[in-house]
Image (cartoon, rainbow, N blue to C red):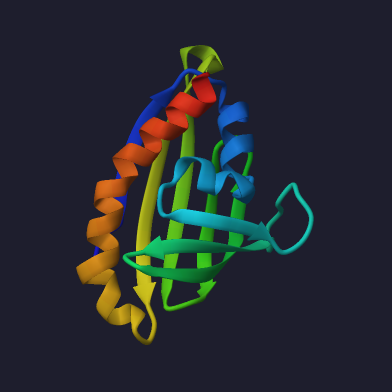
């Protein structure tokens, strides 16, 4: 399956956008399905940093351990699920606009299902993310531009 990809322009510098998005504690502020995100170590993150994000999928709360595998401030990052039935693979890129006064954020998300997650990914998770992602990016834009 292919990744779900969405872009949005944000009236903030790439450094501001990158700093906010790579701090996992902000996830519940802008993603509706994220109910908690707890770092497993100190912030700011570095390659190898891990956190547990708990998401509401239907009536269930499902924790997933995530790990940062690439960080290229303020341009891009990559994190990957390393535990849990549904393991996201998330790539974020930030392009500077207007000489760096604004940013274009592109998020690409794909999933690996393990155990019961194999059945959930195509039927529940991907349709939910396709619906949630545009709302989440709009919420993120509003938060960062406020």
Residue, far right: 42
Q: Residue at x 25, y 51 (%)?
A: 130
Q: Quadrant of residue 129?
A: bottom left
**122 vs 30: above or below:** below
Question: Which x, y percent locates residue 138?
Answer: 37, 31
Q: Is residue 145 left or right of residue 74?
A: left
- The correct choice, above or below, for 113 with respect to 109 in the image is below
Residue for point 46% across, 33% down: 140
Question: Would residue 22 appear left or right of 41 to someone viewing this image?
Answer: left
Quadrant the N terminus occupies: bottom left
Q: Position of residue 101 (x, y in %)?
A: 54, 14
- Relative height, residue 135 to residue 8 (above, below): below
Picture residue at 48% right of the left edge, 77% below the top? 84
Residue 113 image position (x, y, % from top left): 35, 77
Q: Nearer the viewer, residue 32 or 83?
A: 32
Tell me: 74 left or right of 91: right
Farthest-out residue, front:
59
Q: Quadrant of residue 133?
A: top left
Measuring 57% from the left and 21% from the top, which residue is drawn there?
Answer: 13
């Amino acid at each position: 399956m292919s990744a779900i990809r969405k872009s949005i322009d944000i009236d903030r510098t790439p450094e501001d956008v990158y700093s906010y998005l790579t701090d996992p504690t902000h996830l519940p502020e802008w993603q509706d399905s994220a109910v908690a995100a707890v770092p497993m170590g100190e912030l700011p993150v570095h390659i190898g940093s891990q956190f547990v994000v708990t998401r509401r999928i239907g009536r269930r709360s499902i924790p997933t351990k995530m790990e940062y595998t690439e960080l290229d401030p303020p341009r891009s990052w990559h994190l990957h699920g390393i535990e849990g039935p549904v393991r996201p693979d998330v790539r974020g890129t930030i392009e500077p606009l207007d000489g760096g006064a604004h940013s274009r954020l592109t998020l690409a998300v794909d999933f690996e299902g393990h155990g019961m997650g194999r059945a959930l990914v195509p039927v529940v998770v991907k349709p939910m993310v396709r619906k949630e992602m545009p709302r989440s990016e709009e919420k993120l834009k509003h938060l960062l531009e406020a």
